[in-house]
Image: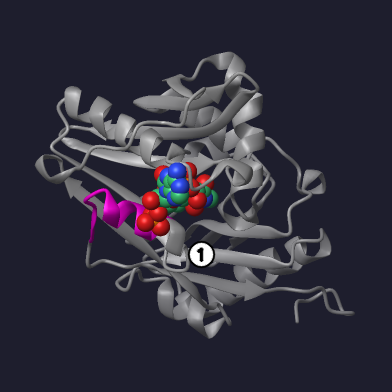
Amino acid sequence: MRLQGARRVFDRLDWWDVNAWEGSALWSFCDEGAALLLVPLDLSPDDALDATRAATAWVRWCAVADDGKAPACLRRVFDEAEARLAAHGVREVWCIVRSFDWLRPYLRERGYRPASRLLTFQVELERAVEAPPLPAGLWLRPAHAGDFDVVCGLDAVAFDEPWRYPPALMRLAFERAFAVTVAACADGIVGYACSLLHQANGHIVRLAVHPSLRLQGIGAGLLMDSVARLRQAGAQAVSLNTQSDNRAAQRLYRRLGFALLDEKPAVLRKPIAPAADGGVT
Ligand SMILES: CC(C)(COP(=O)(O)OP(=O)(O)OC[C@H]1O[C@@H](n2cnc3c(N)ncnc32)[C@H](O)[C@@H]1OP(=O)(O)O)[C@@H](O)C(=O)NCCC(=O)NCCS
């Protein structure tokens, strides 16, 4: 896609590469030089919009050509994409933007408002503390392919909709992660953690414990097991993200030696609803 090389490119595709979305019907284009990809939470590149059951979508990718007039082009692609999603039952569009992202003022103009902030915590590995022992009858082990469906189900009960990992994203996480660890007991899997390693930087991408088994040390056990594995593989620091309204996760991270970093991207949200004329209110 020619816009890939433009100066104004916004990319929040996470595990995906934009080329994976090339043939997707979810794009909105403007001939004057803009492209926008709004994706319902549960869809992957090959899915049609009719398949969505999600109430939320994310702004995944957006670009304006260097000679394109951003306000007019963006109005067109956003109008079109939001109306299309609303007609398929999507009720909110979400987006994570940093203060310097070129798209941010346009999103504000379109009614995208702050819902929370994305916080990043980091621990220098000499400061990490030991996790308490796991409750009796629980153990940690590396995830294997057969765990996939259970981990997807666990993710869906652990996270609210905009933050869930649909199977298509989880599949990529399983394939590309440095490690996926599960907390198991005789009845099955009760928690999981997924991490990445890039040179000396480790990152915990996902951490979740079944709601009925929280506050027993399983989250701490999973987290510090991932940290230990990353350290063994050469990581010097490990980071992770959470939202500013997730107090339980923040308390856990601080207790385990993680410190909050300064950069706090905004999490923006816009309610969308179909209007009688096919537009968006
Ligand atoms: C965040 C999350 C993973 C924590 O999992 P958890 O298993 O409850 O974590 P822990 O039990 O190790 O620690 C939680 C608290 O329980 C306390 N705790 C641990 N064992 C305990 C016990 N036996 N008795 C009483 N309290 C206990 C811990 O001290 C800790 O207290 P804190 O408030 O000081 O942090 C879990 O809440 C979750 O899955 N949330 C939804 C998904 C999510 O937000 N993921 C991470 C952010 S993206």
Residue 9 x %, y % = 39, 59
Indicate whether 70 appears above or below 163: below
Residue 39 versus residue 248: which sits nearer the camera?
248
Residue position for label 1: 95
Q: Which quarter of the picture shows residue 190?
A: top right
Residue 134 x %, y % = 41, 31
Identity, as a three-letter code, of the amino acid under mark 1: Cys
Q: Is residue 181 left or right of residue 154?
A: left
Residue 93 on the magenta span:
no
Residue 30 x %, y % = 59, 64
Q: Is residue 268 left or right of residue 86?
A: left
Residue 253 on the magenta span:
yes
Q: Which quarter of the picture shows residue 141?
A: top left
Q: How is the image coloured?
A: one colour
Q: Is residue 121 left or right of residue 152?
A: left
Indicate whether 171 appears above or below 155: above
